[in-house]
Amino acid sequence: MSLHTEIFNELLKLAVESGASDVVVKSNKPGYVRLSGRLKPVDMDPIAGTEAQAFVDDHVPRVFKTVWENEGQIDFAYTAENVGRFRVNAFHQRGTVSIVFRHIKSRIPTFEDLNLDPDPLLHLAKAKDGILLVCGATGSGKSSTMAAMLNWVNHNFDKHIVTIEDPIEYTFQDDKSVFNQREIGLDVPSFALAIRSVLRQNPDIILIGEMRDKETFETAIAAAETGHLVITTMHAATVAQSLTRLFEFFPPEQQLQARRQIAGSIRGIICQKLIPALEGGGRLPSNEILNCDATIKTLILEGQFEKIQGLLESTGDSHTYSFNRDLYRLIKAGKISKGDGLRFSPNPQALEMNLKGIFIKT
């Protein structure tokens, strides 16, 4: 094993043992680890730019070498022996190499592990068809939530599940279901090609790592309309923002048709944030969940998106609720502080009223 690989493996081992989610390496600086959402320096010698460059050159898969050389940035997976598997993003900045590692945990988490309320998630995971969006910022736990849902399906239903990922984040072991997991660059050259061919692979459930463009979304709609459940992610902070972003895929003259298609195919939207836990360190997920029932579908069809947030706040449905309702629950349960709840709330004034016992009537 080369010296630069040893240096990186030791840093990654320290990160895993500390419970860090990410490792950030900038040439000629010590490594940094992200613990409970906060970036902290590691007490170590600076990592030379030549070592960072050599690490990427040695470990980027052969099929990606041309991309790395021509574009100066690349995503790939790396396995450190006796440490674990990592999602890697390498890139150039100011003429030197920087690398970010995201630890991919080998054991697929359960809803209990993630401190998630399983009831609304299982309700959505049982859908026979349609599109299920899991939204949030980078590092908000979207992949873990999807993995927990798919593994529950794996243990309870006989489904063929095809995943299209860049790179693969969790490796599933077949139980009642059968998984085929395709990694972009290794198993198929591009997302576009994988998306175009997936309907010929006889799936029941399709996981698409990220909703990237109009073509991807149109394929997801086609799959939903032909009896498949499509689970995918998107970078959006709230349910309202998720819906807005969906319609941004379509030009003005296609908006009416898009509303019809989305109203007919969307099953649910899960938005997630990670909030600092009050006890024991770490972070807890808070969710905003929209179960797309007949009322929601009608509002989407009619373009009355502004009414959906009011329903999230006021509904008594246990499968649909706003961030504020979930933050209120976490604060009252003593799991997060009031200050953090207000800081992460999209509407802190309304949450403050909730904590005083004032709620919108259902």
Image (cartoon, rainbow, N blue to C red):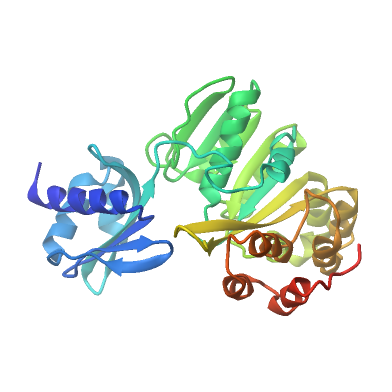
Residue situated furthest bottom in the rendering: 349
Quick one: quadrant of the C terminus? Answer: bottom right
Q: Is residue 222 in view?
A: no
Return the residue nearer the eye: 72 or 15: 15
Numbered marks: total: 0
| Rendered residue at 71%/61% (across/down) | 239
50 sits left or right of 232 in the view = left
Residue 271 falls in which quadrant of the image?
bottom right
Return the residue nearer the eye: 278 or 40: 278
Return the residue nearer the eye: 335 or 314: 335
**Residue 46 vertical position relative to residue 20 in the rendered view, above or below:** below
Quick one: quadrant of the N terminus? Answer: top left
**Residue 183 vertical position relative to residue 70 in the rendered view, above or below:** above
| Rendered residue at 58%/60% (across/down) | 335
x and y, in percent, of residue 228 in the image: 70, 33
Q: Is residue 82 in view?
A: yes
Return the residue nearer the eye: 183 or 252: 183
x and y, in percent, of residue 87 in the image: 36, 48
230 sits left or right of 2 in the view = right
x and y, in percent, of residue 276 in the image: 51, 64
| Rendered residue at 91%/66% (across/down) | 361
**Residue 224 vertical position relative to residue 260 in the rendered view, above or below:** above
Residue 99 falls in which quadrant of the image?
bottom left
Residue 224 falls in which quadrant of the image?
top right
| Rendered residue at 12%/65% (across/down) | 45
201 sits left or right of 91 in the view = right
x and y, in percent, of residue 3 in the image: 8, 50
